[in-house]
Image: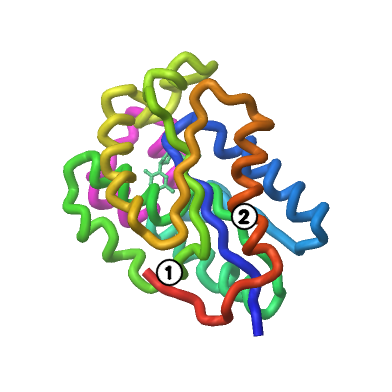
Amino acid sequence: MARAPLIAIEGLDRTGKTTQTSKLLSHLTSSKVKNRLIKFPDRTTPIGQLINKYLTDKQFELSDQSAHLLFSANRWELYTEIINSLTKESTAVVLDRYVYSGVAYSAAKGLDFQWCLNPDVGMPKPDVTIFLKLKDSKATSKREGYGDERYEVVEFQDKVRFQFEKFENESNWHDIYVDGKGIEEVEREIWSVIEPYINGVEEDLHKF
Ligand code: NYM
């Protein structure tokens, strides 16, 4: 028996994740695959609202550890929904950021990598992860609105990228470079990675 796939789209800030995630959902729908999007942080939940304040209000201070645990708690708020979608509802779940972002952003601040992963232990592992990658992290700093939120600073993004790269040996992790490519070219590359998974994956869910 097969179940629906769990697909994660990861990347640094402003690499086009949200645009590409919506393109991917359209491809899934055209291929008659039931699908849903979950974006992390999910800013609509009670914990998500606190995270939104933290990200947008630079006067609102939290310790790095507390912020980290809130991001993880925000994923646990959606745990049951994710599992039910994949199993009971045969619905592919596309995640716009996930555990990898959680670890990479906090470890980039200097928190211990394994400590950062621990609160997410038990969350389902994606069947396939796309990492939208930049050769030059300055490339996106010219995008409109860059710097509005906490973390949107080129030097910090370089540190985040270094932490993300520690996950590159995860199974089913795919790097896709975005610099100098048009939206459609990246969209085609993503689809060629995802398409083999859309008709279902082996039933067992792997966990972090
Ligand atoms: N972020 C996101 C974290 O620091 N930890 C996490 O666990 C997650 C999911 O939130 N700069 C950071 C990365 C982004 C910020 O995400 C908001 P987005 O995708 O820009 O809304």
Magenta stretch? 50-71
131 and 149: which is toward the camera: 131
Residue placed most toward the observer, 135 or 113: 135
Residue 53 belongs to the span the image colors magenta: yes
Residue under the point 33% across and 23% down: 153
What residue sits 63% from the left and 44% below the top? 21
In the image, is 82 to the left or to the right of 136? right
Q: Position of residue 180 (x, y in %)?
A: 53, 21
117 displayed left or right of 70: left
**Magenta stretch, overall SS:** helix
Q: Quadrant of the N terminus?
A: bottom right
Q: Earlier in the sequence, mark 1 or mark 2?
A: 1
Q: Which mark is residue 123?
A: 1
Q: Secondary structure at mark 1?
A: loop
Amino acid type at image mark 1: Met
Residue in the foreground of this view, choosing between 20 and 81: 20
In the picture, measured across the screen, residue 200 lies left or right of residue 62, that is right
| Residue 95, x across and y down, in percent | 55, 54
User: Does the image show residue 174?
Assistant: yes
| Residue designated by label 2 | 194
Q: Secondary structure at mark 2?
A: helix
In the picture shown, does residue 187 fall above or below 72? above
Q: Position of residue 164 (x, y in %)?
A: 33, 45
Q: Residue at x 35, y 31 (%)?
A: 151
Q: Can you tell which mark lies on residue 42?
A: none
